[in-house]
Image (cartoon, coloured by chain):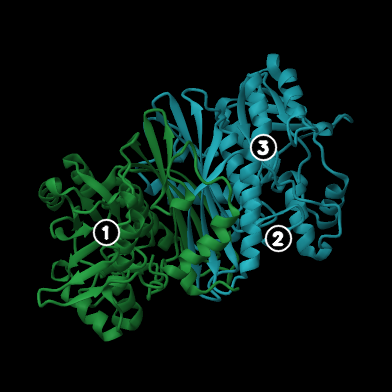
Chain colours: A green, B cyan
Amino acid sequence: MKIGMSHGAGGEVMQDLISNIILSNIHNTRVNGGVGLEDLDDGASIPLGDYEIVMSTDGHTVDPLFFPGGDIGKISVAGTVNDISVMGARPLAIASAMILSEGFPGEDLERIVQSMDAVSRETGVSIVTGDTKVMERGKLDRMVITTTGIGVVKRGEIIRDSGLRPGDKIILTGSVGDHGMALMAFREGFGFDTDLESDVAPVWGMVEAALEVGGVTAMKDPTRGGIANALNELADKSGVGMVVDEDMIPVREEVRAVSEMLGIDPYEVANEGKVIMGVDPEYAEDVLRAVRKAPYGENARIIGEANQDSHVILETSLGGRRILEAPVADPVPRVC
Amino acid sequence: MKIGMSHGAGGEVMQDLISNIILSNIHNTRVNGGVGLEDLDDGASIPLGDYEIVMSTDGHTVDPLFFPGGDIGKISVAGTVNDISVMGARPLAIASAMILSEGFPGEDLERIVQSMDAVSRETGVSIVTGDTKVMERGKLDRMVITTTGIGVVKRGEIIRDSGLRPGDKIILTGSVGDHGMALMAFREGFGFDTDLESDVAPVWGMVEAALEVGGVTAMKDPTRGGIANALNELADKSGVGMVVDEDMIPVREEVRAVSEMLGIDPYEVANEGKVIMGVDPEYAEDVLRAVRKAPYGENARIIGEANQDSHVILETSLGGRRILEAPVADPVPRVC
């Protein structure tokens, strides 16, 4: 077996690789009964005294390094902040390991580090440690960054992918497909000239606002594999189904246009600044109001409701009904 | 300015890159007054309740992936365990982010994961979370792994590079140069046929034994830049000098032979299973005894003593005296 692009694309093919080669060969997968490797959540947790330490890691290979709306520096810090946030933990610290190709321009590195700094200041997270390696010319395409984050949450208050219950409302914090489509359009030669922009942003502000209200039962940021993957993961891990009102899912006009032109489903591509939340119906309206007031949350909506079935069903106001499947792989490689 | 190989080689050139481009552009560099980015220690610390959480990250680009004595999987988990250990913290959890080249053989990946598992079991550390990305053929030489570790230590008991005091004894836990020279010999075509082997191993057992005795004031694992770099870093950060008895530094015969043949100083190349400790003289003999009984510690020795000067001086029994300088860069690139 040889590794293919789809093994890193966040869909079913990747799940198989992870199960067959990685999980089956690792014995120590959790600490003190916390969230561990085989839970395949957005990160892990380590119970310690009155707290749980949440830890998440992400290797960033985005191509191009600079794209409309962001760059690899912004995506690396925001992405890790987001993985910690959706577990319900306050992000505290980031470790950044950069691998650079020999000959990489110092000015580009400086811009990238400045982007990392901007997100770190916006979210109050510190970049506390790092590592730098250089590979010989021709051995690496420019650079990759791996960011690992630590957050803390009071013991027992962690939010899991598997916490969704029948009757919970599903909140989506904004439009979908922006990141994946912006990258794809840029690569196809549209350059910086369209209105298409990545949505890359830290979601902690929205999450914090929701947690202060209460009633949040599950959260996920729909990155690789898009909302198609994230909604299915939430449903599968929680053992529930859901019905989503397709008319309520915001898709920007320019995203829809490019997606039709390229034949790529905007539900299946990565977002980098959105959250899907499951919320107890008694709290849902209050959580929605709070999220809308938080940064990047003004277009948040309740898009559906969990139930006792076992599929993610999309409904339209015209009466259409279809099953939303998890994609086999993200159709757009190397976007995050 | 363009990035060169020496920018990732662990010497002065790399320190300059880190200071000029990275540190000068990042504002939030520590959490709650813990050890932070600009301390350039083996990792960072985050005080939390009665504990400090220690965090360290390392990108592994070793070439070849499989070498005498180990592979990239073993080095990635052991290396991170070691960085946590030398800060005096018990290693608990590892996050592993793998970036694979399209076409990478599944069997090689499996061997590598099994090596990671072996070190994790030996040290009682868990691999709690991970990430997998794939880059298109030609964009990455086979694979890189970034491992990030978390450890815990009681608040106030962290061991810093800067803790060395005049009069402290310097303990070295075994022979030097094995890893760097084994890699270099292998690349030069000696293959697996020599007795030269990397020393890659987790040092937590030795560190734990030393900490149980007490009196440890500073620790460092002499990786990139070798003991020449590590001894100078300890002295510089602590504001002390030291005199080291060169006859007491163990160098294996085969390491010395290859080092002379290739003209590479074994003091300047990476080790992957050794620790340099500064120890209060009252505790030094007891610590030495404890370390010698721990795994990989049987050749530990007291090699010298810190003083009030400002250089690392090597002395020989024949009366030779010379200053050991920090290398400008590790002479052997991509060994860890």
Which label number is shown at residue B66?
Answer: 2
- The answer to which image quadrant residue A297 occupies is bottom left
* Label 2 crowd bin: few (<14), some (14–19), many (20+), radius 10 Å: some
Type of amino acid at the residue the image marks with label 2: Phe
Residue A120 at x, y percent in the picture: 32, 47
Q: Which residue is mark 1?
A: A273
Which label number is shown at residue A58?
Answer: none
Q: Chain of mark 1?
A: A
Q: Nearer the viewer, residue B132 or B86?
A: B132
Between the residue at mark 1 and the residue at mark 2, the CA separation in whole angstroms equals: 39 Å
Q: Earlier in the sequence, mark 2 or mark 3?
A: 2
Residue B83 at x, y percent in the picture: 58, 40
Q: Quadrant of the C terminus of chain A?
A: bottom left
Is residue A244 visible in the rendered image? The answer is yes
Q: Is residue A173 left or right of residue B23?
A: left
Q: Which residue is mark 3?
A: B203
Residue A306 at x, y percent in the picture: 22, 58
Q: Is residue B193 left or right of residue B309?
A: right
